[in-house]
Image (tube, rainbow, N blue to C red):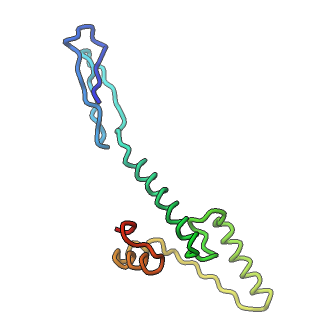
Amino acid sequence: MKLRSSASSNTNDNKFVNIATSGADPPSLTLCSTGCKLSYPPITNLSIVSKLLERLVAQQLTTYLTNNGVLPDLQSTYRAHHLTETAVLKVIGDILLALDSSNLALLSLLDLSAAFDTVDHDMKLRRLQTSYGLDGVVIK
């Protein structure tokens, strides 16, 4: 995109400045002979496109897994009407039932979020093929 300064009265003094960038911070732009400057934020749509694509894929995958009965009943992640609070209430209810029945109750909490970064990519793809029936273009 080209921007033409209209601050100068002489049409020969007008400067054309390219303000389209590829996500990098643009330099301060001089737009007129008097030295007035404007600063523009980076022009990029990559983050928006990435988020939209992620949501579309998640929605399609969740629909596929739900329709084929692949998701466990108690899984609360990525499911409508399955909140974290509901999962916590279920755990607390199970602990209270065990204690009321004079049984031992033990709760162990592990943070496994970083563990998935260490799993081999080919193993993840094989698991998607064998356990969830995803194949072809979907996992390529």
Would residue 10 appear left or right of 53 to someone viewing this image? left
| Residue 89: quadrant of the picture | bottom right
Point out the residue furthest to the right here.
100
Figure quadrant of the N terminus: top left
Point out the residue furthest to the top here.
9
Would residue 2 appear left or right of 90 to someone viewing this image? left
Would residue 89 appear left or right of 119 to someone viewing this image? right
Residue at the spot x=47%, y=80% of the render?
131
Q: How many marks?
A: 0
Point out the residue furthest to the left here.
12
| Residue 115: quadrant of the picture | bottom left
Would residue 31 appear left or right of 80 to someone viewing this image? left
Q: Nearer the viewer, residue 15 or 54?
A: 54
Q: Nearer the viewer, residue 49 or 138?
A: 138
Q: Nearer the viewer, residue 106 or 68?
A: 68
Figure quadrant of the C terminus: bottom left
Q: Provide residue 136's location: percent of width, then percent of height.
A: 37, 70
| Residue 37: quadrant of the picture | top left
Q: Provide residue 122's location: percent of width, then percent of height.
A: 34, 77
In the image, residue 104 sits, relative to residue 13, either above or below, namely: below
In the image, residue 108 sits, relative to residue 30, either above or below, namely: below
Residue at the spot x=58%, y=69% of the render?
67
Q: Provide residue 33's location: percent of width, then percent of height.
A: 23, 15
Q: Provide residue 121's location: percent of width, then percent of height.
A: 35, 74
Point out the residue furthest to the bottom here.
103
